Amino acid sequence: MINKTILVGNVGNDPTYKSLDDQGNGVINFSLATSESWTKNGEKQTSTEWHNCKAFGKLALIINDWVKKGQLLYVEGKIKTRSWDQDGTKKYMTEIIVDQMQMLGKKPSEDKQELNDFDKEFDAT
């Protein structure tokens, strides 16, 4: 069986990193927007889907250092749905567990490093 997801979209907010221990293991969460457009009755229609993304370990640190809101990303991973009880109600969340990422387009402007065209690939290994 295969559980593989490939997305290309824009980061919705700056990723949120959380350290899990003293050995550098951590997790990062971010949202990714993918859009599709079509024409109906001569009018352009657009639909945007928001994906909850999560990465661990070395890839989480790389995303924390390099990825910012609005940036165009290519991500690969798997779909995972988790559930929990909140005030007697069962809640569900579907996430993309990212194991590979490639930054596309131009690097967002900031004081860190001046790069014009930005195209790097990272994976969880």
Image (tube, grey):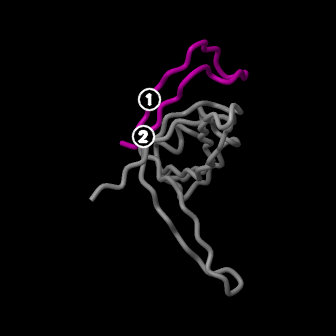
Hey, which quadrant is residue 114 in on the image?
Answer: top right
Give how far across and how far down residue 2 sits, in percent.
Answer: 30, 55
Q: Nearer the viewer, residue 45 or 71?
A: 45
Lateral position of residue 99 relative to residue 105, left or right: left
Which mark, by number, is residue 48?
Answer: none
Residue in view at x 50 percent, y 53 percent: 96
Residue lying furthest front:
41
Residue at which label 2 appears: 100
Q: Nearer the viewer, residue 6 or 123?
A: 6
Give how far across and how far down residue 29 sits, in percent.
Answer: 60, 51
Which range of residues does the magenta coloring cover?
100-125
Lateral position of residue 29 relative to residue 1, left or right: right
Give how far across and how far down residue 13 sits, in percent.
Answer: 70, 43
User: What amino acid type is highlighted by mark number 1?
Assistant: Glu
Cβ–Cβ under 8 Å for marks 2 and 1: yes
Give how far across and how far down residue 35 sits, in percent.
Answer: 61, 39
Counting residues from the start of the chain, the first of labels 2 and 1 encountered is 2
User: What amino acid type is highlighted by mark number 2?
Assistant: Gln
Residue in view at x 67 percent, y 39 percent: 46
Residue 46 in the image: above or below residue 56: above
